[in-house]
Amino acid sequence: MRKVLFQKFKKTQLGASMVEYALLVALISIAAIVTMTTLGTSIDSKFGEVSTAVGEAGGGTGTTTTQ
């Protein structure tokens, strides 16, 4: 009897743990996507500024890429 109850408890806890881990993974993924999106825009604009400054400093003879 005890063994059966322990096995049911173990299965219930395992299921709950899996749900908790899935929620953690989802929240971490959302946070990572938001952070990368925000920083990606900022980093892209900084690279554009540096590219422009380097191009102007070099006399404008370098190659530039446009998107």
Image (spheres, helix red, strand yellow):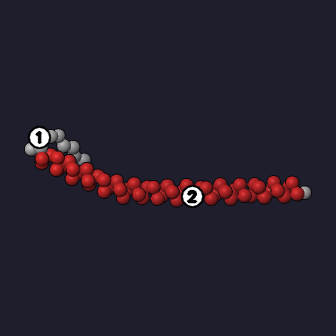
Q: Which of the 4 image quarters holds residue 20?
A: bottom right
- 20 relative to 67, above or below: below
- Residue at the far right in the pictured view: 1
Which residue is rendered at x = 30% and y = 53% of the image? 43
Residues at marks 1 and 2, CA–CA distance in whole angstroms: 51 Å
Give the numbered dot on residue 61: 1
Q: Which mark is residue 24?
A: 2
Residue 38 x, y percent position in the rendering? 36, 58
Does dot 2 land on a helix, a strand or a loop?
helix
Is residue 24 placed above or below 51 in the rendered structure? below
Looking at the image, tell me whether mark 1 or mark 2 is earlier in sequence order.
2
The residue depicted at 55 percent of the width and 55 percent of the height is 25
| Amino acid on which the number 2 mark rests in the picture | Leu
- Say which mark, if any, is on residue 44: none
Q: Position of residue 19 (x, y in %)?
A: 64, 57
| Percent position of residue 26, x then y | 54, 57
